[in-house]
């Protein structure tokens, strides 16, 4: 539909009829859509997409055929068939193996992790209620929080993830000043997006102590849990929780494909049931059936080692290139899993100008301010190694180093 379509005898401006939130979202970011940053010729280090060759197309085709052969029309009906139900059972078993005390009825399948985050927030927050998030944090979650009118308060990260001492100080100050305490804290404790940091067990335990003392729930976004490339895994927050305060969220977007649009949450039964009542529309039972067969038949477990090896290779290529081409005043994270490296420049810079100069050199990144709910990140940016061709990583980082050197000389 054309933007300038003739509205007839009475002119209409549909945008003026939208909510304040919807109007504010139009061109909210000065960078536009992050997917559009750069040009067709640019080496893109922006997107946290899986690399296309990782998609298990052949195995999914076999699962689709099996679902049709064994369940027929039932697979396409409301509710689906047995394979749709198998997915919840498979997730519950996998989460139990991670030390989480749960039953299948604690699992809720969602249309992706963002759907789980959005619906969880709808269950807990009225406009103006307070949520604390680590900052920087996942830009999609920032958008979700702001769309719901939540008062978002940031608390800092360091090399070990969420700074629980800074969080404790923030909470104490709020209590002392009689300011609103948070209803929830949102965190990605393992291979955090965008910094790649992982919270050690002692900090996870302290976070849960604070959640009990100040009476808030913890939204644990564990999207990258399966993509650990070295070291031993830290226990999920939900495995350390004995009070039902943790709402744990996972996704198949990084380990099967984003297009399946399937995630899940694990929560205490009353919380899980309340969240489900807020679902808009239905569940994609056909996709649940296909993924249910794919996982139950062992394809998921078979695929993870290959994914981990390939992503680790890409990470190492990028870390080596950064070591070779970055100026002395630049530092970066060295993640043990996930998709991202966080880069900081120990000088005052104009990040918008640096992005423009980098694109002119043939490389793009996501500027740090995109990952902050308010101000912050002006001297930082996120790099992704998950989607870029490995053969392009060296040249891309070399071009980035050139842009930084030139920016410093201004």
Image (cartoon, rainbow, N blue to C red):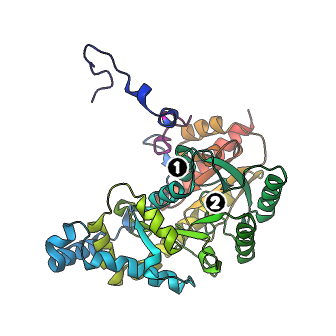
Magenta-drawn segment: 26-37
Q: Where is residue 165 in the image (x, y as percent from the top left)?
A: 81, 63
Q: Position of residue 285 (x, y in %)?
A: 28, 67
Residue 29 part of the magenta segment: yes
Residue at (46% x, 40% y) in the render = 39
Residue at (41% x, 61% y) in the render = 277
**Which residue is denoted by mark 2 in the rendering?**
184
**Which residue is denoted by mark 1 in the rendering?**
144
From this viewpoint, is residue 305 visible? yes
Give me the C-alpha separation between circle 1 and circle 2: 14 Å
State the SS at label 1: helix
When asked about the image quadrant of residue 149, the answer is: top right
From this viewpoint, is residue 265 visible? no
Residue 224 part of the magenta segment: no
Which quadrant holds the C terminus? top right
Tell me if residue 160 comes above or below residue 88 in the rendering: above
The majority secondary structure of the magenta stretch comes to loop
Counting other residues with Cα less than 10 Å from the Cα at mark 1, is it few (<14), some (14-19), or many (20 or more)? Answer: some
């Amino acid at each position: 539909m054309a933007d300038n379509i003739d509205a007839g005898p009475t002119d209409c401006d549909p945008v003026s009829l939208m909510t304040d939130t919807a109007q504010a979202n139009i061109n909210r970011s000065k960078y536009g859509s992050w997917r559009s940053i750069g040009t067709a010729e640019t080496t893109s280090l922006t997107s946290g997409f899986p690399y296309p060759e990782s998609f298990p197309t052949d195995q999914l085709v076999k699962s689709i055929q099996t679902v049709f052969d064994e369940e027929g029309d039932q697979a396409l009906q409301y509710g689906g068939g047995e394979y749709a139900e198998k997915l919840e059972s498979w997730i519950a078993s996998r989460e139990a193996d991670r030390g989480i005390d749960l039953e299948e009825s604690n699992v809720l399948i969602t249309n992706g992790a963002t759907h789980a985050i959005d619906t969880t927030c709808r269950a807990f927050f009225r406009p103006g209620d307070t949520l604390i998030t680590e900052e920087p944090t996942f830009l999609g979650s920032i958008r979700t929080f702001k769309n719901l009118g939540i008062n978002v308060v940031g608390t800092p990260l360091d090399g070990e993830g969420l700074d629980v001492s800074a969080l404790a100080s923030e909470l104490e100050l709020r209590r002392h000043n009689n300011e609103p305490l948070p209803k929830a804290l949102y965190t990605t404790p393992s291979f955090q997006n965008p910094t790649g940091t992982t919270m050690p067990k002692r900090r996870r335990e302290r976070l849960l102590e604070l959640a009990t003392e100040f009476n808030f729930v913890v939204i644990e976004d564990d999207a990258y849990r399966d993509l650990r490339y070295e070291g031993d895994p830290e226990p999920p927050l939900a495995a350390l929780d004995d009070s039902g305060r943790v709402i744990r969220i996972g996704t198949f977007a990084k380990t099967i494909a984003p297009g399946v649009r399937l995630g899940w949450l694990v929560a205490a039964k009353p919380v899980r049931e309340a969240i489900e009542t807020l679902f808009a529309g239905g569940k994609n039972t056909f996709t649940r059936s296909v993924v249910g067969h794919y996982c139950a038949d062992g394809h998921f477990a078979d695929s993870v080692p290959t994914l981990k090896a390939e992503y680790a290779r890409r990470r190492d290529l990028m870390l080596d290139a950064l070591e070779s081409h970055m100026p002395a005043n630049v530092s970066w994270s060295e993640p043990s899993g996930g998709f991202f490296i966080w880069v900081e420049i120990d000088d005052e810079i104009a990040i918008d100008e640096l992005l423009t100069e980098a694109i002119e050199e043939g490389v793009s990144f996501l500027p740090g301010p995109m990952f902050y709910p308010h101000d912050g990140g002006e001297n930082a940016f996120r790099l992704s190694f998950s989607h870029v061709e490995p053969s392009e990583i060296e040249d891309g980082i070399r071009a980035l180093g050139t842009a930084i050197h030139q920016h410093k000389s201004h």
